[in-house]
C-alpha cells in the first residue's frame, strides 16, 4: 500500500450503490458548444449514491466543463439533469447548492486578502440578530481544521499560506457546506503526501455519512485506489464507464487516448548539434516536506526541441522556475555550453542565455496597459540605450524586425496589447524573449488558450527557432502536442524524470504510463 492510499473499502462502503436505483444524479445527453468548439457532445453521466464516482480524460476532454454544468457554473447548450429521478435546472451555483451539490474547483477560488475563517464562510455568514457572528464562525473553523488535522491559524490571511494549505482551505469550505453531492476537481494537485492522506481519510468519513463524491484527477493510480465507478471522456465524448474493481490502468489509458488517436505532425527534420545546456541535480524543496523538483538531470542540444510532459503537479513549471532564476531555494548545477553559470536571479539568467515564456501570458507575460511595441522590447531596453536614453530609432527598428520575423498580425504596434488575439499576444511574448538573444528558450504551455490556427503558427515558429540553433524546452499537458513537435521527450512525475523517449519511441500510451505510474526509466521504456 502506498503512503497516500485510500483506506480499504470494506463493510458498508462495498454494500452501497450496486444497482441502478442507487443513481443519485443523472446527466442525460449533455452538450456544450462554445464559439468554434464543442466541449461536450451528448454526454451521459451517472453518479452513484455514497460512492466515489471518478471522471477521467486527457486535458480538453470536457471533464471540468461537465462538472461546471453539474455545479451550476455553466449552462448546457442542450441536455437534462436529474437528481434522485426528478429533473432539475442548476441555473447558478447557488441553485445547485440548494439542490445539495457543491464543488471544489480545479483553479483555487480563495480570497487572499481575507482570513481563513472569512474564506470558509464567505457568502454564507453566520448571523445572530442579523449581525455576522465572527465568534461562531471562528469556533466552527477551528473544529473543521482540527478534523482535517491542520494546524492553521483561523485568523491568518489566506494569501500568506502556501499553495497546499490554500487548497486545504478550499476543501474545508466545501466540506463545511454539508452537500449531499461533492464534486472534487483535481483536489490533490497542490497537496503533499501527508495532506493527501488526510483528504482520503476525510473522504471515507464523508462516504460513511452518505455523501456522494464525484472525483477528477490526472493521477491514474490514485483513481484506482479511491474510485468505485469510472467514466472516461475523450474530445468531449463519453467513451466508456465501468466499476473500478473490474478494470485496470491499461483499460483507462486505452479509452483515454484511443488506438489510432493521432495529431498532425508539426515536426521538421533538422540537424541536432552540440550540447547547449546541461543540468545536474536540480532540486527544489517543497514547503511541508519533500521536493517539487527532485534531483533532475538532463541535457539540451543545439537545434533540439526537448518536450517536457507531465500531469498537473508533476513539477514541470517548478523546474522552469529553477532554470530561469525565479525559485530562490533551488540548488544544483547548470552548464551553458560546458561552462557552469553561477547566477541566481532572473535578470542574471537572462544575461546567461536562459529565458522563460511563462504559462500565464496575461498575468506573467504581458503588461496589459502597454502597447504591442512596448511589450515586445520590455526585456531588452538596456540593449537599446544610447548614453542615458533609449534610442527611439533603435526601439522602432527592433519592434518592426520582430513583428516581421515572428509574423505578428498587428496594424499598428502602438495599439494596446489587448487588441491582439491570444495567438498574436503569445507571439509578442516569444518575440520579447528572443530580443534578449537567448541560448535556451523555455516555453511553458505556449499554446494554452489559443485556437487551432494559432497553434499551428506557434508550432511552425518553434521549428523555425530550432532550425536557427536555439535550444528549446517545450512544456505541454497536451500529449499530442508534445509528440507532434518534439525531437526528444522527458516525462515528469512527482518532481522526478520518470521517462525519456526518442521521437521514434514516444507513444501516447507510453507517456501516460510514465506520468501516471512513475516507473524508473528502464521500467517505463520496457513496459
Image (tube, helix red, strand yellow):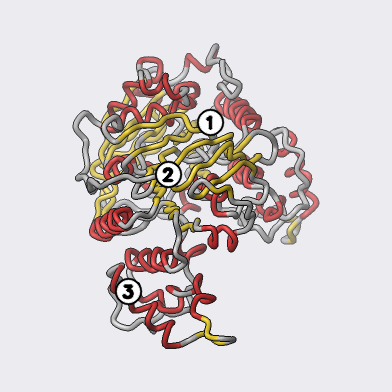
Label 2: how many Cα within 10 Å (few below 14, some 14–19, many 20+): some
Measured in 3D between alpha carbons, the distance from the residue under mark 1 to the one under mark 2, in whole angstroms, is: 55 Å
- Residue located 54% across and 46% down the image: 335
Q: Which mark is residue 403?
A: 3
Asked where in the image residue 160 lies, by quadrant, the reply is bottom right
Q: Which mark is residue 211?
A: 1
Give SS at disc 3.
helix
- Residue located 37% across and 41% down the image: 63
Q: Nearer the viewer, residue 52 or 323?
A: 323
460 relative position to 149: left or right: left
Q: Nearer the viewer, residue 75 or 414?
A: 414
Q: Nearer the viewer, residue 316 or 58?
A: 316
Residue 452: x and y in percent read: 25, 56
- Residue located 28% across and 33% down the image: 257
Q: Is residue 297 above or below residue 436?
A: above
Q: Is residue 235 above or below residue 405?
A: above
Q: Is residue 374 above or below residue 41?
A: below
Amino acid at each position: 500500500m502506498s503512503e497516500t492510499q485510500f483506506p480499504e473499502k470494506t463493510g458498508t462502503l462495498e454494500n452501497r450503490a450496486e444497482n441502478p436505483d442507487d443513481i443519485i444524479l443523472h446527466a442525460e445527453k449533455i452538450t456544450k458548444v462554445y464559439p468554434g468548439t464543442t466541449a461536450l457532445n451528448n454526454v451521459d453521466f451517472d453518479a452513484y449514491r455514497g460512492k466515489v464516482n471518478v471522471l477521467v480524460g486527457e486535458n480538453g476532454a470536457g471533464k471540468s466543463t461537465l462538472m461546471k454544468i453539474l455545479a451550476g457554473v455553466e449552462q448546457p447548450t442542450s441536455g437534462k439533469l436529474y437528481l434522485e429521478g426528478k429533473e432539475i435546472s442548476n441555473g447558478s451555483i447557488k441553485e445547485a447548492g440548494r439542490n445539495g451539490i457543491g464543488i471544489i474547483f480545479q483553479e483555487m477560488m480563495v480570497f487572499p486578502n481575507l482570513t481563513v475563517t472569512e474564506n470558509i464562510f464567505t457568502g454564507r455568514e453566520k448571523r445572530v440578530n442579523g449581525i455576522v457572528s465572527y465568534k461562531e464562525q471562528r469556533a466552527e473553523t477551528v473544529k473543521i481544521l482540527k478534523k482535517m488535522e491542520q494546524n492553521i491559524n483561523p485568523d491568518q490571511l489566506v494569501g500568506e499560506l502556501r499553495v497546499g494549505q490554500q487548497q486545504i482551505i478550499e476543501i474545508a469550505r466545501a466540506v463545511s457546506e454539508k452537500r449531499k453531492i461533492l464534486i472534487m476537481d483535481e483536489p490533490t494537485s497542490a497537496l503533499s503526501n501527508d495532506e493527501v492522506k488526510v483528504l482520503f481519510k476525510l473522504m471515507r468519513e464523508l462516504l460513511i455519512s452518505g455523501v456522494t463524491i464525484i472525483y477528477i484527477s490526472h493521477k491514474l493510480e490514485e483513481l484506482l485506489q479511491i474510485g468505485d465507478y469510472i467514466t472516461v471522456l475523450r474530445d468531449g465524448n463519453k467513451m466508456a464507464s465501468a466499476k473500478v474493481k473490474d478494470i485496470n490502468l491499461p483499460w483507462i489509458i486505452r479509452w483515454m487516448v484511443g488506438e489510432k488517436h493521432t495529431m498532425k505532425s508539426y515536426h521538421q527534420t533538422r540537424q541536432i548539434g552540440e550540447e547547449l545546456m546541461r543540468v545536474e541535480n536540480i532540486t527544489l524543496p517543497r514547503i511541508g516536506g519533500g521536493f517539487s523538483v527532485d534531483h533532475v538531470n538532463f541535457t539540451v542540444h543545439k537545434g533540439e526541441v526537448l518536450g517536457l510532459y507531465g500531469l498537473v503537479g508533476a513539477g514541470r513549471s517548478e523546474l522552469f522556475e529553477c532554470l530561469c532564476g525565479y525559485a530562490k531555494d533551488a540548488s544544483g548545477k547548470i552548464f551553458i555550453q560546458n561552462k557552469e553559470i553561477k547566477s541566481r536571479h532572473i535578470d542574471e539568467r537572462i544575461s546567461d542565455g536562459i529565458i522563460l515564456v511563462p504559462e500565464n501570458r496575461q498575468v506573467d507575460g504581458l503588461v496589459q496597459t502597454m502597447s504591442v511595441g512596448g511589450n515586445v522590447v520590455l526585456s531588452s531596453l538596456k540593449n537599446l540605450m544610447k548614453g542615458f536614453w533609449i534610442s527611439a530609432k533603435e526601439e522602432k527598428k527592433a519592434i518592426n524586425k520582430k513583428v516581421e520575423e515572428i509574423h505578428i498580425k498587428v496594424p499598428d504596434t502602438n495599439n494596446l496589447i489587448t487588441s491582439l488575439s491570444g495567438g498574436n499576444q503569445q507571439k509578442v511574448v516569444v518575440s520579447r524573449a528572443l530580443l534578449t538573444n537567448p541560448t535556451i528558450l523555455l516555453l511553458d504551455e505556449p499554446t494554452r488558450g489559443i485556437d487551432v490556427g494559432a497553434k499551428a503558427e506557434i508550432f511552425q515558429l518553434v521549428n523555425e527557432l530550432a532550425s536557427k540553433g536555439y535550444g528549446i524546452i517545450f512544456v505541454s499537458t497536451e500529449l499530442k502536442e508534445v509528440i507532434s513537435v518534439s525531437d526528444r521527450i522527458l516525462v515528469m512525475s512527482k518532481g522526478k524524470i520518470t521517462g525519456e523517449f526518442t521521437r521514434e519511441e514516444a507513444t501516447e500510451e507510453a507517456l501516460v504510463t510514465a506520468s501516471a505510474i512513475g516507473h524508473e526509466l528502464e521500467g517505463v521504456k520496457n513496459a
